[in-house]
Image (cartoon, coloured by chain):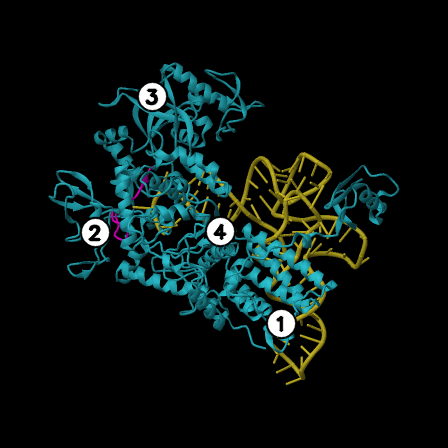
Amino acid sequence: MARYTPRETEPKWQAAWEADSTFAARHDPARPKYYVLEMFPYPSGRIHMGHVRNYTMGDVVARYKSSCGFSVLHPMGWDAFGMPAENAAMERGGHPKDWTYSNIADMRAQMKPLGLSIDWSREFATCDPDYYGQQQAMFIDMLHAGLVYRKNATVNWDPVDMTVLANEQVIEGKGWRSGAPVERRELTQWFFKISDFAEDLLNALDGLDNWPEKVKLMQRNWIGKSRGLQMAFSLIDPPEGFDRVEVYTTRPDTLMGASFLGISPDHPLAKALERDTPEIAAFCAECRKGGTTEEAIETAEKLGYDTGLRVRHPFDTAWELPVYIANFILMDYGTGAIFGCPAHDQRDLDFARKYGLPVTDTFVALENGQPVENEAFVPAKSEPVRWLKPFAWDEVATGEEAVDAAIRFCEENGAGQGVTKFRLRDWGLSRQRYWGCPIPVVHCETCGVVPEKKENLPVELPYDEDGKPIDFSIPGNPLDRHPTWRDCTCPTCGAPARRETDTMDTFVDSSWYYARFTAPHAATPTDMAEADYWMNVDQYIGGIEHAILHLLYSRFFARAMQITGHLPQKAIEPFDALFTQGMVTHEIYLTRDANGRPVYHLPEDVEAGKLKATGEMVEVIPSAKMSKSKKNVVDPVNIIDSFGADTARWFVLSDSPPERDVEWTASGAEAAYKHLGRVWRIAPGIVDEMSEGGIAAYEAEGAGADTGGEDDLTLRRALHKTIHDVTIGIESFGFNTSVAKLYAFTNILAKSRASLPARREAMLVMAQLMAPMTPHLSEEIWDMLGGQGLISRAAWPQADPAMLVEDTVTLPIQINGKRRSELQVPKDMSKEEVEKLALADDAVQRALNGGAPKKLIVVPGRIINVVI
RNA sequence: GCCCGAGUGGCGGAAUGGUAGACGCAGGGGAUUCAAAAUCCCCCGCUGCAAGGCGUGUCGGUUCGAGUCCGACCUCGGGUACCA
């Protein structure tokens, strides 16, 4: 008997699909369309198991939907701009462009043997001038539509390398290369006005029925709509130009517990004081040390500086509060100033204790309410509490009621204004880096900031300077120091001008690629006819790590593209259904360099806790998301080489539920291979039993007729149950359970004594059910057993409902909720009869010991519970 | 710090509030073989001679019945706006 040889059969079927153009997406108005998209990869150069898992899941959906009669669009591209290319050029020399395109070629070559049903004719990379030129055109349209503007924003500044650092490049507050303490510095940056859409982005989440609740919840919290009070505290003896401090608070009900006013070190008042007082300047400089991340700011030690200024409490002009500059107050949120109420905010309480400020309770718990000591009293806003100084509501009221009443009271008395604020900030898209999409504007001395003319697009990145590839070993942005690239003429007046040297955040690239796939070669960003047919993405699949930023930015971009005429109204929410797959994790291996800094190693370079090359022991850090920077990535190419793509595909689908993280282990791959070999061996057994003349002769003999025996019926029932279960598994993203059902059916088929026609039918159908997961093996079996045409074009099998009906059911009998016995009864037996039988059961009789049960619960078709 | 998840045998995991552990891995036993590989069959949560008892991160609650629902906590993971 011939052996299972994926090395030979897989390329054969891949060639057959290509010759047949099986996976070309066809704009066919007569058929329903289905657009399945997996988040496109960053071209690191090697595919890893996370990619295999992600793209196999999408492929299962694409192949399944195709066999259900849909015209399927399943494209692939490359998220090709970004820092790693510049880092590689910095470390190893070479050019980001060459590095990137070479990586893309490598990864495509690694991906193709997986046999994915991708329409490769639509492939593009975001670093293709053809793509980013269209992105520049859209940027200009957005600029005209008032969706883009410039303002100051804070960046991580490395004072030694004199360059802007990404958050990832700030390690424990220090620059990753220079080791110098990082400072926060302000630069003028480009912004998208995503905050204009905050309300809509929030409300529209309710319509995304096929998105995971957790993702919608994370986005809701991120957008962070809050109702609060904006009010002014008047300053006593203010510096010139100031008379009050505007404060935003979501807890105006705690005003009577105010103990200090806090302002951000970046607040205009702090900046004014800084100019005159060296001590304040020193304090603000101290506050600006460290990175820009919310995490760094929130977890830093809370520091405050008493400015000596005082404000009057709005309800009592004799009540004065000190004004502190505090490092934990963000200028980006609210007004950059707060009032501190230590009794009901832990952070304020810590601050008050540290600086000896008063702690005044405004409310206490209803029962045995104790005054606050070292733990702030912060009950849920819906919980009623007892107020010590209610100024517009009852003594017993909830926080919600008190907040509403406080806002109303302050509005009526002219003390403040109820306002709605969002946590969501505008999207800063400027990057002071080379390897990104150039922002297509020009700075002209007379005309100011002017967009480039569309006919001059794309504004292409320069490859060389003075005839030599750009040198990336020098820190900073090569565009900024390029001898000629910056020089241009003003599109408006024609005078000599300078190009913008900032490039775009790579999130811009990935915020509209799904739309470009519908017409990847169009001369405009999209082709409305194509977008109208293919949009929306019916099923989007990707990692949960993108739950907020990428998905929120994409939702914003779809709206912006609709406004600028690049997407139809119906595509305003571009992703109808979202599935977030878990990550593939792996242990992390590292050694230390002379300075004690970690050096990471690939799993393939490590054996038994030691480096293969040197024998040096490695430190092992528990599993985490596979990432290029930590090098904890596994190479699937080896798996495909030794076992074939179908084994790799079957394995990544089999062991873990798709939404959950999976830790990569080598042991499962062999098991998957063994199983596929077993499936494969059943088919030639069936072929051998058919007539000498082969399948044609066998069919001519009329041997396809059902012999109708008991074994045939049993097999057929199992088959239809399997069709049903596998289909439900695929429809609900339970691929691992589909796989389990196929394992179980293989066991049944292998042992079946059913007739040859019944077993042949079962094998053909099983091949179809496996085809989305193991397409090559399925084609081979289909072909062997005389299936018509390609299995990839065959219609999905339908379960016969009559075959799914069971005649008898097994009812477990519980006594006091514990299973003690069971009962076989006809499916439609009446409740009364079941009760009688249950009470007659030996175990029940024993337990009752002659008495009567307290209660008897019969859930028809499910369970019996006897309560004693 | 804040927001969102996840915790079930030796391991990956299954289970519309209704028999916890499907399916697979590892392990044990057997068949076949001169022998081995491959393949096939059987056993396999813990504990107990058994009847039974105990078991889904911890502690409480709701329910006839909780892995599933509610509350508090612990541990791990993701995000935290310049990693993608």
For label 3, count other residues whose C-alpha is less than 10 Å away and answer few (under 14), some (14-19) or many (20+): some
Membership of A435 in magenta stretch: yes
> What residue does disc 1 label?
A700
Seen at 48% across and 21% down, the residue is: A402
- Residue A244 in the magenta stretch? The answer is no
Q: Which amino acid does the dot numbered 4 rest on?
A: Gln
Residue tagged 4:
A581
Q: Which of these two is toward me, A128 or A804?
A: A804
Magenta-highlighted residues: A426-438
Q: Which residue is mark 2?
A: A479
Please, is residue A820 above or below residue A411 in the view?
below
> Which is more foreground, mark 4 or mark 3?
4
Q: Which residue is mark 3?
A: A232
Q: CA distance from mark 2 to mark 3?
A: 46 Å
Asked if the residues shown at circle 2 and circle 4 are in contact, with their CB atoms under 8 angstroms apart, the answer is no
Chain of residue at mark 2: A
> In what element is the residue under mark 1?
helix
Q: CA distance from mark 2 to mark 1?
A: 74 Å
Q: Which mark is residue A525?
A: none
What's the amino acid at mark 3? Ala
Is label 3 in contact with label 1 (beta carbons under 8 Å)?
no
User: In the rendered view, does A165 fall on the left or right side of A650?
Assistant: left
The span from disc 3 to disc 1 (Cα, nearest Å) is 93 Å
Which quadrant of the rendered structure holds the N terminus of chain A? bottom right
- How packed mark 1 is, by other alpha carbons closer than 10 Å (few <14, some 14-19, many 20 or more), is few
Name the quadrant of the C terminus of chain A. Answer: top right
